């Protein structure tokens, strides 16, 4: 099945590779927070290194301390959840490994998996690598990328095994509301489907919007819900590769065996740092979300409304913008890279029908966001 992923090659990695040898490039491409870990965390890391032991494997499923802290963190966020960390929490190498392990745990060859489009490209690749078939349901841009539940229900077949949710959305920055989530749960329950719930950006919600998760309704779907999380964005730990999965016990047992075959364990030092971040999450969160709010407003103020159409992102840190020029998104992204020296991500990589869109990230430095959008506006006018 690996050769079949060519059609869905990840545009993010491709654009970053193309930019490697171009001097003076500004990146609005990869979604990577520019925030460094604070001094109080770095000092604690130094103490961990002095004590040693971090260069050894951890337990296969992750350290007990981190798994317990993760369970407490989730139960604090989702008050109705009751979690047994020993039987439900698996520490992974980022949310990416969590979603891959989830798919390998539930799919048989030829099973169908529904994804909402625009989709996160690696999810499609993972479905194919697991032997599944991706089925796409277009989101309604006119309603700020909402789900058409009749359309969703209509694509479910006797081969459908799961629905993948990425909420808040990468690439649109949109949120699925309570009605959306309840409708997905209803369909999944009636059709005996799994929900694979990617909540990498669940901490980034703006404009006093209410974030809704299937985990707000555990009594309705808990036996068929697999939720995947990451420390990468919430705690600015993209390079440390640590995430986690919350799953029913039977899925947890399968996923743990797959995790062993894929990676053995998440990096031990990264797990220790992740535990530190959870222990200091209240202190860390002070001002962290505000930085992204400020960057979002900056990009919003800079985007030329004559050149771009867009829906306001209420979550994550992306604008998914539509442009009016008669040129493919891949070509315009490459031209912007070579001529304006700005990295953007072509919309066609998030679904063929989004070929007149670009994804712009506001995760980086404010100065680069400002300069990058100025360069794009100038290039578009020319």
Image (spheres, rainbow, N blue to C red):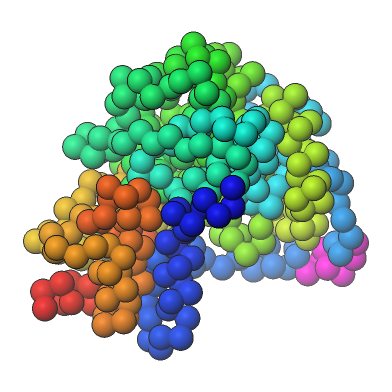
The relative height of residue 207 versus residue 356 in the rendered view (above or below) is: above
- Specify the principal SS of the magenta part: helix
Along the line of sight, the residue nearer the viewer: 121 or 243: 121
User: Which residue is farthest top?
Assistant: 190
Q: Residue at x 80, y 48 (%)?
A: 261
Tell me if residue 362 can be seen.
Answer: no
Q: Residue at x 41, y 86 (%)?
A: 22
Q: Position of residue 85 (x, y in %)?
A: 76, 31
In-image side of 181 versus 71 (left or right): left
Q: Residue at x 90, y 65 (%)?
A: 52
Along the line of sight, the residue nearer the viewer: 329 or 40: 329
The relative height of residue 215 versus residue 143 in the rendered view (above or below) is: above
Q: Position of residue 49 (x, y in %)?
A: 83, 68
Numbered label tally: 0
Quadrant including the C terminus: bottom left
Q: Residue at x 48, y 74 (%)?
A: 17
Q: Position of residue 271 (x, y in %)?
A: 75, 53
Q: Position of residue 275 (x, y in %)?
A: 72, 50
User: Which residue is farthest bottom?
Assistant: 23
The relative height of residue 199 versus residue 231 in the rendered view (above or below) is: above
In-image side of 1 versus 209 (left or right): right
Q: Look at the image and give the residue range highlighted in magenta.
A: 46-53
Along the line of sight, the residue nearer the viewer: 250 or 209: 250
Tell me if residue 109 can be seen.
Answer: yes
Q: Which quadrant would residue 299 be assigned to in this image?
A: bottom left
In-image side of 112 versus 248 (left or right): left
Q: Is residue 356 magenta?
A: no
Q: Is residue 52 magenta?
A: yes
């Amino acid at each position: 099945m690996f050769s079949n992923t060519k059609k869905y090659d990840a545009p993010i990695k491709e654009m970053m590779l193309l930019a490697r040898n171009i001097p003076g490039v500004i990146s609005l491409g990869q979604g990577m927070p520019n925030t460094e870990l604070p001094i109080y965390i770095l000092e604690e890391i130094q103490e961990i290194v002095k004590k040693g032991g971090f260069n050894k494997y951890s337990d296969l499923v992750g350290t007990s301390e981190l798994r317990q802290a993760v369970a407490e963190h989730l139960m604090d966020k989702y008050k109705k959840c009751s979690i047994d960390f020993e039987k439900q929490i698996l520490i992974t190498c980022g949310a990416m490994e969590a979603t891959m392990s989830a798919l390998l745990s539930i799919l048989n060859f030829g099973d169908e998996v529904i994804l909402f489009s625009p989709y996160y490209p690696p999810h499609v690749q993972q479905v194919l690598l697991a032997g599944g078939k991706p089925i796409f349901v277009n989101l309604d841009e006119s309603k700020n990328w909402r789900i058409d539940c009749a359309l969703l229900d209509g694509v479910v077949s006797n081969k459908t095994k799961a629905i993948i949710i990425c909420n808040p959305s990468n690439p649109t920055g949109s949120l699925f509301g309570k009605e959306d989530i309840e409708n997905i749960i209803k369909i999944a329950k009636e059709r005996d489907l799994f929900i694979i719930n990617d909540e990498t950006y669940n901490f980034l919600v703006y404009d006093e919007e209410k974030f809704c998760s299937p985990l707000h309704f555990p009594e309705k779907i808990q036996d068929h819900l697999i939720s995947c999380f990451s420390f990468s964005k919430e705690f600015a730990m993209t390079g440390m590769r640590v995430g986690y999965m919350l799953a029913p016990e039977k899925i947890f047992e399968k996923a743990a065996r797959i995790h062993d075959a894929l990676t053995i364990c998440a990096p031990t030092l990264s797990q220790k740092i992740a535990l530190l971040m959870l222990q200091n999450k209240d202190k860390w969160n002070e001002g962290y979300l505000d930085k992204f709010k400020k960057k979002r407003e900056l990009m919003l103020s800079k985007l030329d409304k004559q050149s771009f159409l867009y829906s306001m992102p209420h979550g994550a840190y992306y604008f998914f913008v539509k442009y009016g020029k008669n040129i493919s998104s891949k070509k315009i992204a490459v031209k912007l890279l070579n001529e304006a020296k700005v990295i953007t991500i072509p919309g066609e990589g998030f679904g063929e029908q989004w070929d007149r869109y670009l994804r712009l990230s506001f995760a980086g430095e404010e100065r680069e966001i400002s300069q990058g959008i100025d360069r794009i506006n100038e290039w578009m006018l020319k």
